[in-house]
Structure formats: structure tokens, C-alpha cells
């Protein structure tokens, strides 16, 4: 299964558009390290530069200063996944149709790609990639013939999609931003001077000194044309289901996502953990970097001192190949290493943001034991991840998820820890702003957008235990 967990950035009417986009992507590199792409509208056509790897490696001065001409444009960073990583699948995706030059950059994952693709193929469409984004581009072209404006065609195309999509679309000299009616993935509107910008996360605005205006609403389409903004609802939002994992792990703590400051939300989760499961320990130690913020919250709430005694190597390459469990353990060792003198005889309370396969914790707890830790307690600032995500997060099959297959007591034993507590779902909802706006499918298996026929069938087979009503 494909997973798309990406970063978007767009700018309208800026004389240094390509450079702005470059910085916007640079600030969002954590959202995707597999490939990066920038497209600009030069007044006549779309210019593009895409490549595999990090933003700083894909673009050079020639691209930014000369080739990516124009004052309107957007870019995309794509998340590294276990599947084939192909330049062909790098975004933004471009199609040409008559005088229209259309580029689409997508963050999220559709759950009815199979049917849409089959329908389009039956009507003669030919696909170049395996991306759901290409399916969307074809749909837009299809509806263009029965629409007065590109916005109308996009709205019609969107109404055929199911799943998660925040997207930026460059249609000649229009820049259009859309968010699916459930609002799964973040997308924000900002302004630099009198020019509009869009980004998945607002840390991108900070870098270019843009002002954050607001998040897009679920089902909203914003068009910027000739420097003017217009907005419409292409679909009614019946129930928000924003990805709570953005707050738990994915987004940068200095960002606003869905209108919330990630740092504060993570601290609140940590504080809630301390209330739910206090323990007497010598200190609180996060597994950096993602565990740091909840650990601050835990420490402040509990009064236990915070020690940053697990050190992270920041240069661990994204190409770290992990063919076997042994190699995974090795890569954890490369990434995280304890300060030895802090461990001997100590009662350590570890705060981790999430446990997926359990590799990180198991490998490092073993080391802490070898170094003479007296007690090791683990507090996880999210509930047990028991179900795969079909809307864009890289929790592939249930078989890999440790909490899907084992009760908490067994996990504690298996990890060699003295106590284990996961933040409860009510505790998590209490810690975040707006407790009714979230997708919790990875915790409770309630999928807000049912999976389509074929995908649903595949998923039921791969992950027994998924509720049948999640599939249509
Ligand atoms: P585990 O080692 O249990 O498989 O994974 C848990 C660790 O991976 C945690 O430290 C968590 O911060 C991190 N993590 C959670 N989700 C993701 C993800 O989607 N990608 C990556 N690279 N790390 C993740
Ligand atoms: Mg982590």
C-alpha cells in the first residue's frame, strides 16, 4: 500500500517565488525526505524541477535563480516509504491539456483510487504513475469539459474522491488550495507582505517571515488569482476527523496544525500522562526528539526532574536500509545512545511519544539494563496503536503493530520494563483542543471514511480484526 505523508508549500505573486518555496519546503523537510519538487508558472507555461532526496540536494542556485521563473508556484516534499521510491512518483504532478497547464501536489491518501482509476481507464485514460494524485488530475480534466471554470471542475473532481487530501493546484496563473471534507491533513493560509502563501505547517511561514492567517476549513477551496483571494465550500463537512498523529508525532512542535500549537498540545499530553500514571522515579527521560515535549509536560506536572540522558544522532541518513529486525536494532543504536554515568542505580521514567513496532524501546531498554538502571518505567503519550492507517500514515499492516497483537502486560514484559502506561483515549482527547474533531482510527479502528471495495478487501485480509463496516 502506498502512503503519502507529505509537505506542501505555495506562494502567489512573489518575485522570489522559487526561493520562497525552497525555504518553505526546507522548513518542512521532516514531512518527507524521499523526493522534493517545485513548479512555477512563468506566464506561459509551468516550469518544474523534481528529484529524489533532500530539498538541499535537489535544488541548486541555477534552478532557483534562473530556471524556475515566475512569481507563482508551489512545491512538495514526499515521505520515504517502504515501497518503491521512484522519481516518476515525485510531485508536483503535471498534466497538459489544451492551453491548461495543471500541477497537483497532494498530501494524504485516497481510499477509492482503484475504482476511479478503473473507471477512467475504461474511458480511455492512460496512467503514467501509480499515484492517486494522477487519478485526481485526470478527473479534473474530465470535468473541465462540463464546467465553466477550473474551480468548478476541481470541485466536481473532489466530490468523487474519498479519503484524505490536502492539495495545492497550480492551474496556469491560479493557485488553488483544497482540504478534504473531513480535514484529515493540515493546510494553512498565510501572507508575506501582501502576497498569499500556503503551507502544511506554519513553521514554513516563520522561516520566510510570513504571517499565519488561518487553517483551511474541511471541504474548503481557496483560489488566489491576480493576487486576490476567493473561497468556496466544495463539500459540506459532516464531521471533522483531523489526524491526531500530527499532534502526537509528525508535525514540528513550533508549528500550528489545525490551528493548534503542537508544542503545547504535546506538553498537555505529557502532563495528562503524569496524572493518569504517576510513578516514583529519579528522573524523567525523553526519547528524543519526538518524546521531548511530552516529557517536559510530565516533568512539570509530576515535579520529577527532567534529564536529557538519551542522546540523539541527528545525522542518521534517511537511506538507512533496514532489511531485517537485527538491522533495525542497529539503526536504533546509531540514532539513540544513553549517557552512561546517568544510568547506574537510577529509577528512570522514559517518556516516548509513540510505540509502533516496539523496536526503539526494546533496543534501548536492553542497553539501559546493561548499564545498571535499577527501575525502568515507560509512559507513552499516545494510546496503543492497534490499527493501520489508510489516510496517509506509515503504519502499514496490523501484523507489525506491537499493540495490535499483544496486551499491555505482555508488551511490558517483552520490553523488559517495570511498568508501562499508554495515554488513554479520553486522556488524549482531554489534552487537545476540540475533543470531537479527530480521527482516532489507529487507536480504535473506527475509520471515518469507509474503505472502498477492493482496498477494503485487501485490508481486511491483511489486518484481521478491522471492523467490516469500515469497508463498503
Ligand atoms: P517503534 O520503534 O516502536 O517501531 O517506533 C516508535 C518510534 O518511532 C517513536 O520514537 C516514534 O517517535 C517514532 N515514529 C512514530 N511514527 C513514526 C513514523 O511515521 N515515521 C518514523 N520515522 N518514526 C516514527
Ligand atoms: Mg520518537
Image: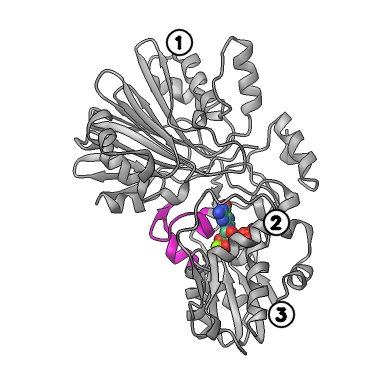
Q: Quadrant of residue 25?
A: top left
Callout 3 environment at 10 Å: few (<14), some (14 to 19), or many (20+)?
Answer: some
Viewer-side label of 2, 1: 2
Residue position for label 2: 325
Residue position for label 3: 418
**452 displayed left or right of 99:** right
The numbered dot on residue 317 is none
Q: Are marks 2 and 3 in contact (CB under 8 Å)?
A: no
Residue 233 in the image: above or below residue 182: above
- Across and down, in percent, residue 305 comes to 49, 85
**435 displayed left or right of 1:** left
Residue 395 in the image: above or below residue 110: below
**66 displayed left or right of 127:** left
Which residues lie in the magenta part?
Answer: 246-266
Residue at 29% across, 33% down: 63
Viewer-side label of 3, 1: 3
Front residue (pair 171, 52): 52
Quadrant of ligand 1: it is: bottom right
Q: Are marks 2 and 1 in contact (CB under 8 Å)?
A: no
Look at the image and tell me whether residue 461 can be seen: yes
Question: Could you tell me how far apart the alpha carbons at marks 2 and 1 are, in whole angstroms?
Answer: 52 Å
Of the two numbered discs 2 and 1 on the same chain, state the one appearing first in sequence: 1
Q: Quadrant of the C terminus?
A: top right
Residue at 64% across, 11% down: 122
Looking at the rendered structure, the secondary structure element under dot 1 is loop
Residue position for label 1: 145
Q: Is residue 254 within the magenta segment?
A: yes
Amino acid at each position: 500500500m502506498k502512503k503519502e505523508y507529505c509537505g506542501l508549500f505555495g506562494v502567489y505573486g512573489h518575485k522570489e517565488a522559487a526561493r520562497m518555496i525552497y525555504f518553505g519546503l526546507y522548513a518542512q523537510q521532516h514531512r518527507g525526505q524521499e523526493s522534493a519538487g517545485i513548479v512555477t508558472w512563468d506566464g506561459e507555461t509551468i516550469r518544474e524541477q523534481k528529484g529524489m532526496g533532500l530539498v538541499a540536494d535537489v535544488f541548486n542556485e541555477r534552478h532557483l535563480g534562473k530556471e524556475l521563473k515566475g512569481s507563482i508556484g508551489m512545491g512538495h516534499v514526499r515521505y520515504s516509504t517502504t515501497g518503491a521510491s521512484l522519481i516518476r512518483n515525485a510531485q508536483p504532478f503535471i498534466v497538459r491539456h489544451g492551453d491548461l497547464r495543471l500541477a497537483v501536489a497532494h498530501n494524504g491518501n485516497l481510499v477509492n483510487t482503484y475504482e476511479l482509476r478503473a473507471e477512467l481507464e475504461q474511458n480511455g485514460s492512460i496512467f503514467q504513475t501509480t499515484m492517486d494524485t494522477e487519478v485526481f488530475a485526470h478527473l479534473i480534466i474530465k470535468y473541465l469539459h462540463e464546467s465553466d471554470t477550473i474551480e468548478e471542475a476541481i470541485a466536481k473532481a473532489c466530490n468523487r474522491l474519498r479519503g484524505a487530501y490536502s492539495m495545492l493546484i497550480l492551474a496556469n496563473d491560479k493557485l488553488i488550495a483544497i482540504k478534504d471534507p473531513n480535514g484529515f491533513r493540515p493546510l494553512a493560509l498565510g501572507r508575506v507582505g501582501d502576497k498569499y502563501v500556503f503551507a502544511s505547517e506554519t513553521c514554513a511561514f516563520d522561516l520566510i517571515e510570513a504571517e499565519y492567517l488561518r487553517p483551511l476549513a474541511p471541504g474548503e477551496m481557496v483560489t488566489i488569482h491576480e493576487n486576490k483571494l476567493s473561497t468556496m465550500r466544495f463539500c459540506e463537512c459532516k464531521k471533522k476527523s483531523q489526524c491526531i498523529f500530527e499532534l502526537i508525532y509528525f508535525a514540528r512542535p513550533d508549528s500550528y496544525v489545525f490551528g493548534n500549537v503542537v508544542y503545547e498540545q504535546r506538553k498537555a499530553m505529557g502532563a495528562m500522562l503524569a496524572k493518569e500514571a504517576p510513578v516514583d522515579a529519579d528522573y524523567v527521560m525523553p526519547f528524543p526528539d519526538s518524546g521531548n515535549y511530552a516529557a517536559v509536560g510530565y516533568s512539570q506536572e509530576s515535579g520529577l526532574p527532567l534529564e536529557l540522558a538519551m542522546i540523539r544522532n541527528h545525522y542518521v541518513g534517511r537511506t538507512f536500509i533496514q532489511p531485517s529486525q537485527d538491522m533495525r536494532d542497529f539503526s536504533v543504536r546509531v540514532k539513540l545512545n544513553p549517557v552512561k554515568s546517568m544510568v547506574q542505580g537510577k529509577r528512570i521514567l522514559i517518556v516516548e511519544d509513540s510505540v509502533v513496532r516496539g523496536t526503539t524501546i526494546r533496543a534501548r531498554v536492553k542497553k539501559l539494563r546493561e548499564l545498571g538502571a535499577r527501575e525502568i518505567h515507560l509512559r507513552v503519550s499516545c494510546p496503543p496503536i492497534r490499527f493501520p492507517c489508510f489516510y496517509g500514515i506509515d503504519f502499514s499492516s496490523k501484523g507489525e503493530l506491537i499493540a495490535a497483537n499483544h496486551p499491555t502486560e505482555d508488551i511490558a514484559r517483552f520490553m523488559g520494563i517495570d511498568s508501562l502506561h499508554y495515554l488513554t483515549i479520553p486522556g488524549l482527547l482531554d489534552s487537545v483542543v476540540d475533543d470531537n474533531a479527530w480521527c482516532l482510527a489507529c487507536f480504535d479502528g473506527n475509520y471515518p471514511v469507509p474503505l472502498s471495495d477492493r482496498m477494503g478487501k485487501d485490508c481486511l485480509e491483511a489486518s484481521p480484526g478491522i471492523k467490516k463496516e469500515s469497508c463498503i
